[in-house]
Amino acid sequence: MKYTGPKVKLSRRLGIPLTNKAARVMERKPYPPGQHGPAKQFRRGRQSAFERQLLEKQRLRAQYNIHEKQMSNYYKKAVAKQGNTADILIQLLETRLDAFVLRAGFAPTIYAARQIVSHGHMEVNGKPVNIASYQLQEGDQVSVRNKSRRIEVLVQSIANAAPPDYISMDKNAMTAQMLYAPRRVEVPIVCEVPQVIEYYSR
């Protein structure tokens, strides 16, 4: 999914900042958008189990900017594997190329990460890849293509990069490596993943 709607409105509806601008706005307006937004802020505790599951699923989708069909497929893959389904689901999402580009610090948002990848600015193990959903493996190295190393958004993002433990970053070389598939607790997302699992297991 290439979401092109207002990011601030989506962020306020889901209760999570998806961009820096959304974070600033939500400090002033910590409630859903619309005429009845402030009232809805105090009704969150009275959600049904289904409403809660749906919200968490939408939150997870928004943070990875993917279609419902894609999320459903990732869930099916996670269930088919042995192990903790929640951990496996997050690992599948985190090993997407666009998600890795975001976590490593090549891009400030998931939307920018998708654009950077689709415009052909990244390489995986020395080969150009422009597919956002490309699945990385442990040990894969992602780098900025030589012709793209002066792009301002990349330069600024890399300068401020603070990747998690499962990513090794060389800012000078503009390269990052996936050391291992992360566990849920290591991934900086706002979501109750078990609620998402319950939603799809209905």
Image (cartoon, rainbow, N blue to C red):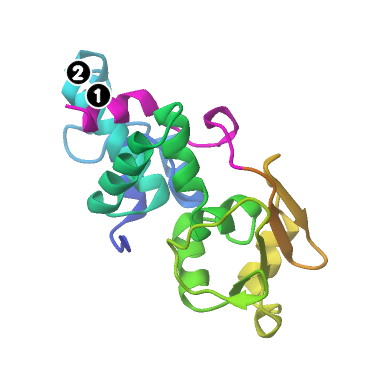
Q: Is residue 80 above or below residue 22?
A: above
Q: Residue furthest top?
A: 46
> Looking at the rendering, in which quadrant would you find the C terminus?
top left
Q: Is residue 196 magenta?
A: yes
Going 47% across and 31% down the picture, which residue do you hit? 87
CA distance separating discs 2 and 1: 5 Å
Q: Is residue 39 above or below residue 63?
A: above
Q: Position of residue 57 (x, y in %)?
A: 29, 36
Q: Which residue is mark 2?
A: 49
Q: Which mark is residue 52?
A: 1
Q: Is residue 182 above or below residue 123?
A: above
Going 51% across and 53% down the picture, which residue do you hit? 99
Q: Residues within 10 Å of mark 1 (few under 14, many from 20)?
A: some
> Looking at the rendering, in which quadrant would you find the N terminus?
bottom left
Instruction: Check contact, mark 2 vs mark 1: CB within 8 A.
Output: yes
Viewer-nearest residue: 114 or 137? 137
Position of 133 with respect to 121 (left or right) is left
Viewer-nearest residue: 25 or 126? 126
Amino acid carrying label 2: it is: Ala
Viewer-nearest residue: 70 or 57? 70
Q: Residues within 10 Å of mark 2 (few under 14, many from 20)?
A: few
Secondary structure of the residue carrying numbered label 2? helix
Going 69% across and 64% down the picture, which residue do you hit? 156
Q: Position of residue 64 (x, y in %)?
A: 41, 49
Secondary structure of the residue carrying numbered label 1? helix
Going 68% across and 68% down the picture, which residue do you hit? 143
Position of 117 with respect to 35 (left or right) is right
Q: Position of residue 11 (x, y in %)?
A: 35, 43
Q: Is residue 183 magenta?
A: yes
Amino acid carrying label 1: it is: Arg
Specify the segment rendered in magenta.
181-202
